[in-house]
Amino acid sequence: MKKIVIGITGSIAAYKTCELISRLKKKNYNIEVIMTKNAAQFVTPLTFGTLIHKPVLIDDFDETGYQIKHINIVKDADCFIIVPATANIIAKVAHGLADDVLSSAFLAATCPKIIAPAMNVHMYENTATQKNLDICKSYHIKIVEPEIGELACGYQGRGHLSDIEDLLDAIEYATYPHPLAGKHVLITAGPTQEPLDPVRFISNHSSGKMGYALAKVARQLGAHVTLISGPSSQRAPYEVDVIKIQSAQGMFKQVLSYFDFQDYVIMSAAVGDYRPLEYSDQKIKKKADEFYLKLGKNEDILSYIGKHKTKQTICGFAMETENVIENAQNKFFKKNCDLLVVNDLFEDGAGFKTDTNKVALITKNFVDYLDLMSKENLAHIILEKLMKVKGE
């Protein structure tokens, strides 16, 4: 069980740390909490103690026994995050001050460290605060930048505590090994839309969940990730470069522009095979009982990159409704993939829009049948398999 130490300072955003802790507990992390006395004015220590089922550390001078609390609490920690972090604690960290339990513990910790600022926009943008943040970055402390929004003080601007999902991603990144550090991974996700007129388009049921899960996990494993996504409501993973496209032609153009620099390419998008050959600038009016569309074939992106790969390791996806493995194996060899992920649309829990998937992994020498699992767990397995195929 990984150990996370959470420091909480005197900001109105302290209440949001309750949700962060709840989410971390569901992921089975061992949580320790340190609060400043000012933080306790916003949320009581009892609240956090109830969430973590243990006492919260506040007063550094209430030492009992022979253990020094601010040293012992960071022992064996996998990550230490201060959230929310005020301008005051950032200044202390930048200049090595240790005048309370939180600043002392943070100085003593040797694990990966994260600071998530939250404060008035003018305090955040102040030259002194920005210089202090730069100093913290020079110490290899990760800064999860605040968002722009309406602040408790009534101002509008940057200073709003970062989204909980981004904080979770930053913590998970800090606690993961990084076998893909220095590698570039290109992932496609979601559906494509082929416009017919300003109102209508041809598309499919893809939600993008699998591609976004792959992008999140690839980043956690240390890669520089570029995600080329069709229309999707999925949240952009933290620190992933997301490029939005609409059509298959748009996706093809973007894939080609990034392809040469990639170590891995994962084509998980559900790309439309055909597009209307004619586009109407105005909405097509209902007239006859029958309406015929003339369609043209889109470029086969997976086939193209399979033919032109040099150093890239390529993973394709296939969704079948019959002769699943036979059709997938034919696609694997025809498209010159290194790995192919195939699922049966009619399998319970698999296919479009679900949070789970049940697939088979196909390479030159084997077919590996996997059980039903979450798409995030599947993303780990796919990336591990790709690294093995590449010999890394």
Image (tube, rainbow, N blue to C red):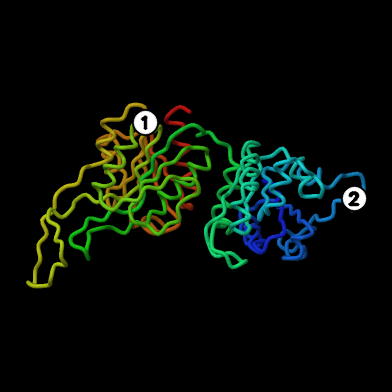
Give the left or right position of residue 286, taking residue 213 as reference.
Answer: left
For disc 1, the marked residue is 312
> What's under tag 2, amino acid-wise?
Glu
Q: Earlier in the sequence, mark 1 or mark 2?
A: 2
Q: Identity of the amino acid at label 1?
A: Gln
Q: Which residue is mark 2?
A: 63
> Residue 225: percent from the left, percent from the top?
44, 41
- The residue located at (74%, 52%) in the rendering is 32
- Name the mark nearer the viewer: 1 or 2: 2
Classify 10 Å Cα crowding around label 2: few (below 14), some (14-19), many (20 and above). few
Residue closer to the observer: 280 or 26 = 280
Q: Position of residue 279 (x, y in %)?
A: 14, 57
- Secondary structure, mark 1, is loop
Place of residue 326 in the rendered image (x, y in percent of width and height, measured from the top left): 28, 42
Q: CA distance from mark 1 to mark 2?
A: 57 Å
Q: Note whether 289 is above or below 79 in the view shown.
A: below
Image coords of residue 83 (percent x, y): 66, 54
Left or right: 172 with respect to 314?
right
Task: Identify the residue shown where x is 61% and y is 41%.
Answer: 134
Helix, strand or loop at mark 2: loop
